Image (tube, grey):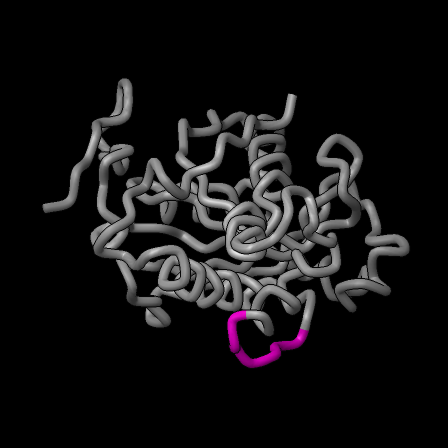
Amino acid sequence: MTLLRRRHGGADPMPAPGCPLRDLPLLALDLETTGLDPVRGEIVAVGMVPVDGTVVRLDGAWQSLVRPAGGRGVGDSATVHGLTDDTVAAGSALSDVVSRVLGELAGRVLLAHHAAIEVGFLSRACRRVGRDFPDVRVVDTVRLHRRVLGRGRPLGHVGEDELRLGSARAHLGLPPYPDHDALTDALACAELYLAQVEHLGGADGLRLRQVASRVPPSR
């Protein structure tokens, strides 16, 4: 039976720390941004895929371009994600995208690779559009992969390159995907999470408290 806890002041249940991973609802989320600082940067694309236990829900996958606020351009970040000013200008308003993401996140754990980026930008976006950032639980596949790589190694002997999404997937035998497409990266993160869980003990034996990370929102 899935263990759930009611959100304070809300009707949406959120998974409790003791929820078995076989029952855990997650939302794999990836953001393409104009930089790494949520105070100065902008979200320009969002991709997300629900995960129910050990099942990736492709029927719930969703992506959207995001129109930068104030007519800002993408700057040099175009060389990373390939999105140009003309492309993102046709995207959805940030308020609409935030509403969709928060709706899909209700009752689910946020799953991301380098989750501090997603939490930082999403919490900042919530403030920009006058929404409260929810009290979400977070699973970060970077932190999980440190545990995967740390097995049998001296403490601290994990290289940053080994923690990249593509490198982590390759280590666990997953196929390569193109980088820096929001929906593709969200799917890649979801698949990586399932492989990591299997490597670390399996969805039947692990619980949320054993894989969750504390990631504070942006100030």
Q: Position of residue 147 (x, y in %)?
A: 52, 49
Report the residue at 33% width, 67% height from top: 57
Question: Which residue reaches farthest left?
Answer: 1
Horizontal relation, residue 189 to residue 26: left or right: right
Q: Is residue 125 visible?
A: yes
Horizontal relation, residue 170 to residue 196: left or right: right
Report the residue at 52% width, 67% height from top: 188
Report the residue at 46% width, 49% height from top: 111
The part of the image, by quadrant, that contains residue 91 is: bottom right
Verify whether residue 28 appears in magenta.
no
Q: Magenta span covers which residues?
A: 172-178
Horizontal relation, residue 192 to residue 168: left or right: left
Work out whether residue 122 or residue 96 is closer to the camera in this orientation and state it.
122
Q: Position of residue 131 (x, y in %)?
A: 49, 28
Question: Which residue reaches farthest bottom?
Answer: 175
Report the residue at 44% width, 60% height from top: 196
Q: Is residue 97 visible?
A: no
The part of the image, by quadrant, that contains residue 110 is: top left
Question: Looking at the image, how many numbered discs can be counted on the residues?
Answer: 0
Q: Is residue 203 above or below residue 183?
A: above
Work out whether residue 22 or residue 92 is closer to the camera in this orientation and state it.
22
Verify whether residue 173 appears in magenta.
yes
The part of the image, by quadrant, that contains residue 84 is: bottom right
Question: Which residue reaches farthest right?
Answer: 76
Which secondary structure is most common in the magenta stretch? loop
Q: Position of residue 25 (x, y in %)?
A: 29, 50
Q: Quadrant of the C terminus?
A: top right
